[in-house]
């Protein structure tokens, strides 16, 4: 008797019509990516990956069954065909069992202006909610505005968004609407998106902050989340800042906060270079937290050196180091237009350059805050 005949004689392999139907239902409805109920979401994820790989991450996606409806701006008319082909071939040849995209609607995709960097911001002030910056499409702008009205039914929503290309992800609209929902749970706050950096600034209860952290602990790539949120007015991550009201303070309060952080910390650079040492990442993140809450004021990053070496070389090095710190703060969501950097070289020494300790004290970064 052959192996096949042996298997067919076993009850396990005897399937009637009911068994075949049951297996088909399991295949269509089971907990896997090929299941019928999962198909639109799986296709959206695959199309999103295809758009990113094609160099068009700012185009958003709406799935209507197996039809992909794309919205947004591209840089050139030829990109319209590129994203259509990318979406159509994102999974396979199409059809219910092949699990592919059957058609792509690009009627709402057209060439347009791009924003670099890509900025979007929501500010809540009492019962006034202002939304500024770029939305990736008119459809996204409408969806974000509707989400704001739903999350803040008692607030006056002021929409000052404009449509521009350059969004970092096809999921920009979903991330923005989720962020609005979490902002509503805080007593005060602000949301910022600077390219792929998502920032929350504000204050709320322990429960609201814990919920916010859980919701954005792992945002969809390439987004990174920064949560500079206090709990009932206290900042457990930066105890040295206790007693300083940075949300409604003045330039002097913000300058005092920078000074407190720099009293026991140093921003280290590679020798003779403007490359920030990895060991300084923690203090830079703390400084970014202060800068984000204080950038309604002008913030100058000042770089200083000791008097060793040629003056012109020190002036240039101090400028590049100040530029590096300002750039890092901007990459963390600090308003770039409120940041300036200046190199002072060996001028204004803080200690005597005659000793190694004095020279080390003079190699520093300082922050000046003004209205």
Image (cartoon, helix red, strand yellow):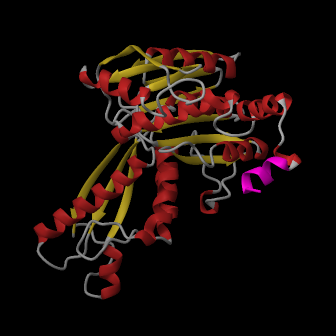
| Residue 158 showing in the rendered view | yes
Which quarter of the figure has residue 318? bottom left
**Highlighted magenta segment, given as a residue range:** 1-9
Considering the whole magenta stretch, tell me its main secondary structure: helix
Q: Residue at x 18, y 80 (%)?
A: 308
Q: Is residue 168 visible?
A: no
Instruction: Please tell me whether residue 4 belongs to the stretch shown in magenta.
Output: yes
x and y percentages locating residue 237 in the rendered image:
63, 59
Quadrant for the C terminus in the image: top left
Q: Nearer the viewer, residue 141 or 2?
A: 2
Q: Position of residue 43 (x, y in %)?
A: 55, 31
Side of 157 relative to 347 (left or right):
right
Tell me which residue sits at (37%, 72%) in the image.
Answer: 268
Q: The N terminus is located in which quarter? A: bottom right
Quadrant in the picture for residue 360:
bottom left
Q: Was residue 39 drawn as part of the magenta stretch in this picture?
A: no
Identify which residue, 247 or 109, lies in the foreground. 109
How many dots with numbers?
Answer: 0
Residue situated furthest right in the rendering:
11
Give the residue at the far front of this rendering.
1
- Tell which of 32 and 128 is nearer to you: 32
Query: Measured from the top left, where is residue 152 in percent x and y?
Result: 68, 21
Q: Position of residue 170 (x, y in %)?
A: 47, 31
Q: Nearer the viewer, residue 157 or 144?
A: 144
> Height in image: 232 above or below 72?
below
- Relative to 128, does residue 351 appear above or below in the rendering? below
Is residue 126 positioned above or below 233 on the image? above
> With 267 as the anchor, is 218 left or right in this view?
right
Please identify the residue farthest to the bottom as the structure is shown: 355
Q: Is residue 130 left or right of residue 329?
A: right
């Amino acid at each position: 008797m052959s192996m096949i005949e042996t298997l067919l004689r076993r009850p396990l392999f005897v399937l009637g019509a009911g068994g075949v139907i049951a297996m088909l239902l399991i295949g269509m409805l089971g907990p896997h990516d090929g299941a019928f109920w999962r198909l639109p979401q799986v296709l959206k994820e695959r199309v999103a990956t295809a758009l990113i790989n094609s160099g068009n991450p700012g185009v958003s996606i709406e799935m209507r069954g197996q039809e992909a409806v794309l919205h947004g701006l591209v840089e050139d008319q030829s990109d319209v065909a590129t994203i259509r082909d990318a979406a159509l071939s994102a999974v396979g040849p199409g059809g219910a069992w092949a699990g592919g995209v059957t058609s792509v609607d690009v009627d709402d995709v057209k060439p347009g202006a791009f924003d670099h960097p890509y900025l979007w911001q929501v500010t809540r002030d009492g019962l006034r909610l202002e939304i500024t910056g770029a939305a990736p499409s008119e459809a996204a702008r409408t969806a974000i505005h509707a989400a704001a009205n739903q999350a803040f039914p008692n607030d006056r929503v002021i929409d000052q968004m404009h449509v521009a290309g350059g969004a970092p992800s096809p999921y920009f609209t979903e991330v923005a609407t989720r962020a609005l929902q979490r902002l509503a749970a805080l007593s005060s706050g602000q949301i910022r998106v600077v390219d792929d950096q998502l920032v929350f600034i504000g204050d709320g209860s322990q429960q609201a902050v814990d919920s916010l952290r859980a919701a954005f602990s792992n945002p969809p790539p390439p987004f990174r989340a920064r949560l500079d949120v206090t709990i009932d007015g206290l900042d457990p991550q930066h105890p040295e800042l206790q007693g300083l009201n940075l949300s409604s303070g003045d330039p002097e309060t913000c300058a005092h906060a920078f000074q407190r952080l720099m009293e026991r910390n140093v921003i280290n650079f590679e020798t003779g270079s403007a490359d920030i040492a990895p060991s300084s990442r923690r203090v830079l993140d703390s400084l970014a937290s202060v800068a984000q809450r204080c950038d309604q004021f002008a913030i100058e990053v000042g770089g200083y050196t000791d008097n060793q070496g040629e003056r012109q070389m020190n002036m240039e090095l101090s400028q590049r180091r100040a530029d590096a710190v300002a750039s890092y703060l901007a990459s963390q969501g600090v308003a770039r237009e409120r940041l300036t950097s200046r190199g002072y070289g060996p001028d204004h020494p803080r200690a005597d350059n005659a000793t190694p300790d004095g020279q080390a004290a003079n190699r520093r970064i300082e922050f000046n805050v003004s209205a």
